[in-house]
């Protein structure tokens, strides 16, 4: 069944979550920004945990499944993939259905490295990718307070919500 084309009055929201292990010998890339760190994120792609959470939020909002449906980690084509490219690919699919992104809000949960100094750069990079003003892209940093896999410094998690609105040029059919 084909989904009805959204009207400009239509809104949809989506949620995304991801986590990746911290390991030595990998770059730490978050929201398309490389961060100086003795440890990086392990994964099939570049393991950009924040880009993945946002991608899932967009997919969920548009009724398009999840990131694993679109970019299986069993597919060699996505080994070492730039996750911003994957996010852009999904953005294209979302827009093709008649949706535009209204805003994205995120929280990164990490004990290390300290993300505070990079929050603005990450928001600006993501805003550029999503075609939004940086004020429409929230990048918040939290820690695990010593609890769980995040608190022990074993990994990093990211949460995202995305709000979509029907494109201005879109009409219902
Ligand atoms: Mg991931």
Image (tube, rainbow, N blue to C red):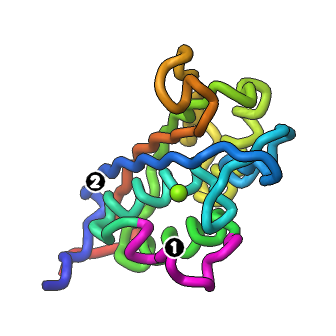
Q: Dot 2, how many residues are within 10 Å of its Cα: few (below 14), some (14-19), or many (20+)?
A: some
> Residue 12's image quarter?
bottom left
Would you say residue 74 sits in the magenta stretch? Answer: yes
The residue range painted magenta reads 67-81
Q: Is residue 47 left or right of residue 1?
A: right
Q: Nearer the viewer, mark 1 or mark 2?
A: 1
Q: Is residue 7 left or right of residue 77?
A: left
Which structural element holds mark 2? strand
15 w.r.t. 112: above or below: below
Q: Dot 1, how many residues are within 10 Å of its Cα: few (below 14), some (14-19), or many (20+)?
A: some
Q: Which residue is mark 2?
A: 11
Residue 73, which numbered label? 1
Q: Position of residue 74 (x, y in %)?
A: 50, 79
Q: Position of residue 126 (x, y in %)?
A: 65, 51
138 w.r.t. 30: above or below: above
Task: Report the quarter where the C terminus lies.
Answer: bottom left
Q: Residue at x 45, y 50 (%)?
A: 102
Task: Report the quarter where the N terminus lies.
Answer: bottom left
Q: Residue at x 71, y 44 (%)?
A: 124
Which structural element holds mark 1? loop
> Residue 39's image quarter?
top right
Out of 64 and 92, give the one closest to the viewer.
64
Number of numbered markers: 2
Q: Residue furthest top?
A: 145
């Amino acid at each position: 069944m084909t989904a009805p084309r959204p009207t400009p009055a239509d809104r949809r929201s989506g949620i995304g979550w991801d986590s990746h292990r911290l390991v030595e010998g990998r770059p730490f890339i978050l929201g398309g920004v490389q961060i100086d760190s003795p440890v990086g994120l392990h994964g099939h792609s570049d393991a950009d945990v924040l880009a993945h959470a946002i991608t899932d939020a967009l997919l969920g909002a548009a009724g398009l499944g999840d990131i694993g449906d679109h970019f299986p980690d069993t597919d060699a084509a996505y080994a070492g993939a730039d996750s911003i490219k994957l996010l852009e690919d999904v953005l294209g699919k979302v827009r093709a259905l008649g949706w535009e992104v209204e805003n994205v809000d995120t929280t990164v949960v990490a004990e290390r490295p300290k993300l505070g100094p990079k929050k603005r750069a990450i928001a600006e990079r993501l805003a550029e990718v999503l075609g939004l003003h940086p004020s429409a892209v929230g990048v918040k940093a939290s820690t695990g307070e010593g609890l769980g896999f995040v608190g022990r410094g074993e990994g990093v998690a990211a949460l995202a919500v995305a709000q979509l609105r029907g494109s201005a040029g879109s009409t219902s059919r």
